[in-house]
Image (spheres, rainbow, N blue to C red):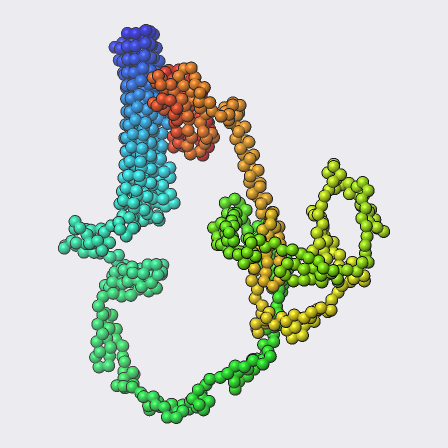
């Protein structure tokens, strides 16, 4: 009954076809019932099939004894037209069993209860959105998921991925490595094979096996172990046998009156062998020795016999009753060993013994106090010897040291000190963008603060007006600084080397000297302004080298001077004398502190107490960071090119939600794409849309997943990696029976 219903029937009998094209291709098949638009449309020779609902069993042609109830139920069954499989399946619900093609003996109930593969058999799955990707599995509950053979998942959103694994409870998770494991309870996580976890929140990590965790929040951390209960002091469990309320101060309470506690039993030889593998970690372990009939406890390094021991003394013989051994104490028997010590003058005597003269221990006054004295570098002790301490000093009373250099190799900074060993520090933590210590300096009033550090009061550096500006004045040959000292510059005045520089075009000439072509320094405008600076006798040019001018200063080409040290007085030839006694401490040492470190651009300057500073260029530390930024930019360019290649030149343009398809809505490209954990497909549906859904296909054309879209207006559908294997997929939006748009996405994992 209906347009084209049973149109091709030849010798088929006892069939009932109701609806447009229902049973359309039936020829010799019999005892079939097809109700609904296109229900059983391809059935030709199948026997005993029942298909109720639009497009239910639409691809079944040769398979028999199937029952499909619901629109699109069993839609792809027998798609390959095999005559030896796809039999005896029962699917009830909208899209139930939609994707399976060759499997048989399956029972599935619930809207969108479906397969993630098209050759699955002997499965029972009940619950909306339940998904199966194995054989001989059982699923019961909303959105349950099994992705291995012989798995059982019972409970809403429970996920089982291990072979022969069982998950029971809300949102339990058995990972792919959890073969032959059992998880029972709320939110249980099992990641290892041959394990059992029972109780809310119990956990077995991924790296162990053959373990069990029983009780709420029970966690087992090593293989071949059984843990009962939570480890927190407030929730630890007490185990009771023969009692309804075990003692909470006992881990194990044995309350039976007709049973005992049986320890591990072993021979003395076995106990000795066992003890060779123990350490202080096993302190407190007890066993029963069958040879000695004695309980032994491990005290951390050896066995200690337990039980009561009795000592008895009989005729000078001490008997230890536990072992029966005897010990003869006769040689030690004199009935007393009390002795008295007496002191007469400096003679110390022991009763019935000898006397010792102690006079050598005193100095006649009853004391042995001695004085130490230091003369020059000679240290003497009263009535004793002397020691020359001169090797501890360098003869000058000072040990000022300079930092002689600093070098950077890779990320290792080496600092060298005069007359000492070098020190190195790894600066790698400063360069990768995550181990960096960039800090901001801030000034509030006269307080200088560093981000995440301390503050320094700079008020002592100012003059009460908030400034430390100072003026330099020159009077004749005397250079003075405001509130500071004066320097005599006459030593640099010899008036013997006045010369003129002249510039003609790009040629620089010096009186009575040569000419230099500066054209390479010009920038096309004929200008190369640079600043010249003088530090001591060193003349430097901006962005150039330095020249030592000391040979120009005294008319003879030299200004050598001699330093003379007399005691602690240091004198310079033709100059003054300085007392350096404050630099020594009597031991010949002058420990120095690093007084500061500053960073200018990429140059690190390190200052040492009483010595010169050293600088090192840290620019090479930024090379890797710059390279990583460049690599990220290249990756973004590559991703944009892939998106454009995948989805068109406008795929990375801003989304215009106002561009609504005239058929009732539109669908956007999923983001992110490619994706690894989850991705989101956004869409817009007009309010008058009656039915909408998404279909996701693999590249071979097989349907992977169908998702109903129930909300209207702007919305989104989120996909996670649990339901998909890595690869390329196409997804299509259907609105009121019409295909609106198709896009491509890539899952990488």
Residue closer to the observer: 227 or 45: 227
Q: In the image, residue 460 lies at what x, y percent?
A: 54, 58
Outermost residue to the left: 257
Seen at 61% across and 68% down, the residue is 399
Seen at 79% across and 41% down, the residue is 506
Left of 725 or right of it: where is 186? left
Quadrant of the image occupied by residue 484: bottom right
Quadrant of the image occupied by residue 263: bottom left
Outermost residue to the right: 512
Seen at 25% across and 65% down, the residue is 306
Residue closer to the observer: 306 or 699: 699
Left of 627 or right of it: where is 669? left
Numbered circles on residues, count: 0
Q: In the image, residue 563 lies at what x, y percent?
A: 70, 69
Q: In the image, residue 50 lies at what x, y percent?
A: 27, 16
Seen at 58% across and 69% down, the residue is 589
Outermost residue to the bottom: 345
In the displayed structure, 587 sits above or below 635; it is: below
Quadrant of the image occupied by residue 538: bottom right
Q: In the image, residue 34 lies at what x, y percent?
A: 29, 13
Residue closer to the observer: 125 or 560: 560
Q: Quadrant where the N terminus lies?
A: top left
Q: Quadrant where the C terminus lies?
A: top left
Q: Is residue 409 visible?
A: no
In the displayed structure, 518 sits above or below 491; it is: above
Q: Is residue 483 visible?
A: yes
Left of 265 or right of it: where is 526? right
In the displayed structure, 650 sits above or below 336; it is: above
């Amino acid at each position: 009954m209906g347009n084209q219903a049973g149109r091709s029937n030849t010798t088929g009998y006892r069939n009932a076809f109701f609806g447009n094209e229902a049973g359309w291709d039936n020829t010799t098949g019999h005892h079939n019932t097809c109700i609904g638009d296109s229900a059983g449309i391809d059935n030709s020779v199948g026997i005993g099939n029942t298909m109720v609902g639009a497009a239910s069993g639409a691809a079944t042609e040769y398979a028999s004894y199937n029952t499909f109830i619901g629109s699109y139920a069993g839609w792809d069954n027998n798609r390959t037209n095999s005559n030896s499989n796809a039999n005896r399946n029962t699917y009830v619900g909208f899209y139930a069993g939609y994707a399976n093609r060759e499997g048989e003996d399956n029972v599935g109930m619930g809207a969108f209860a479906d397969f993630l593969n098209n050759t699955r058999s002997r499965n029972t799955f009940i619950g909306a959105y339940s998904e199966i990707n194995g054989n001989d599995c059982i699923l019961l509950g909303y959105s349950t998921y099994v992705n291995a053979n012989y798995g059982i998942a019972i409970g809403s959103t429970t996920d089982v991925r291990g072979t022969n694994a069982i998950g029971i409870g809300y949102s339990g998770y058995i990972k792919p490595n959890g073969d032959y494991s059992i998880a029972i309870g709320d939110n249980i996580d099992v990641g290892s094979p041959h394990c059992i976890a029972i109780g809310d929140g119990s956990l077995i990590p991924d790296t162990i096996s053959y373990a069990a965790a029983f009780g709420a929040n029970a966690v087992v951390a090593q293989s071949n172990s059984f843990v009962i209960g939570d480890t927190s002091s407030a929730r630890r469990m007490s185990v009771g046998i023969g009692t309804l309320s075990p003692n909470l101060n006992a881990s194990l309470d044995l309350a039976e009156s007709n049973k005992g506690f049986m320890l591990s039993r072993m021979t003395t030889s076995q106990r000795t062998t066992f003890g060779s593998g123990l350490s202080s970690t096993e302190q407190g372990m007890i066993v029963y020795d069958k040879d000695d009939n004695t309980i032994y406890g491990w005290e951390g390094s050896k066995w200690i016999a337990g039980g009561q021991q009795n000592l008895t003394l009989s005729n000078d013989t001490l008997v230890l009753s536990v072992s029966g051994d005897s010990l003869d104490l006769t040689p030690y028997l004199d009935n007393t060993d009390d002795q008295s010590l007496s002191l007469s003058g400096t003679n110390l005597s022991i009763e019935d013994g000898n006397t010792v003269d102690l006079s050598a221990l005193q100095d006649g006054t009853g004391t042995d106090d001695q004085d130490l004295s230091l003369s020059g570098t000679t240290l003497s002790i009263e009535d004793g010897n002397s020691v020359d301490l001169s090797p501890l000093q360098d003869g000058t009373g000072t040990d000022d040291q300079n930092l002689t250099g600093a070098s950077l190799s890779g990320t290792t900074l080496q600092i060298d000190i005069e007359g000492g060993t070098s020190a190195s520090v790894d600066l790698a933590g400063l360069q990768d963008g995550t181990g960096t210590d960039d800090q901001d300096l801030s000034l509030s009033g006269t307080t200088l603060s560093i981000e995440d550090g301390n503050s320094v009061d700079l008020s002592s550096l100012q003059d009460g007006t908030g400034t430390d500006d100072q003026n330099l004045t020159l009077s004749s040959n005397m250079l003075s600084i405001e509130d500071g000292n004066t320097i005599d510059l006459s030593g640099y005045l010899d008036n013997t080397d006045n010369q003129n520089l002249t510039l003609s075009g790009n040629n620089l000439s010096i009186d009575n000297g040569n000419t230099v072509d500066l054209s390479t320094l010009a920038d096309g405008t004929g200008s190369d302004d640079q600043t010249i600076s003088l530090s001591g006798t060193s003349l430097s040019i901006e962005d150039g080298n330095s020249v030592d001018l000391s040979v120009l200063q005294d008319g003879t080409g030299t200004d050598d001077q001699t330093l003379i040290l007399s005691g602690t007085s240091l004198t310079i030839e033709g100059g003054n004398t300085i007392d350096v006694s404050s630099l020594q401490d009597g031991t010949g040492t002058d420990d120095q502190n690093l007084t500061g470190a500053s960073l200018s651009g990429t140059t690190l300057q390190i200052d040492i107490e009483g010595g010169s500073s050293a600088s090192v260029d840290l620019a090479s530390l930024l090379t890797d960071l710059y390279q990583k930024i460049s690599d990220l930019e290249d990756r973004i360019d590559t991703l944009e090119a892939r998106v454009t290649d995948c989805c068109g030149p406008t795929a990375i343009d801003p989304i215009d939600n106002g561009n609504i398809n005239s058929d009732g809505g539109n669908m956007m490209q999923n983001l992110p794409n490619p994706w690894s954990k989850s991705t989101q497909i956004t869409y817009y549906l007009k309010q008058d849309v009656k039915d909408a859904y998404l279909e996701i296909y693999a590249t071979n054309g097989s349907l992977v997943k169908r998702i109903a879209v129930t909300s209207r207006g702007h919305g989104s559908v989120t996909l996670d990696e649990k339901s998909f294997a890595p690869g390329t997929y196409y997804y299509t939006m259907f609105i009121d029976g019409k295909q609106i748009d198709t896009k491509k996405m890539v899952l990488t994992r």
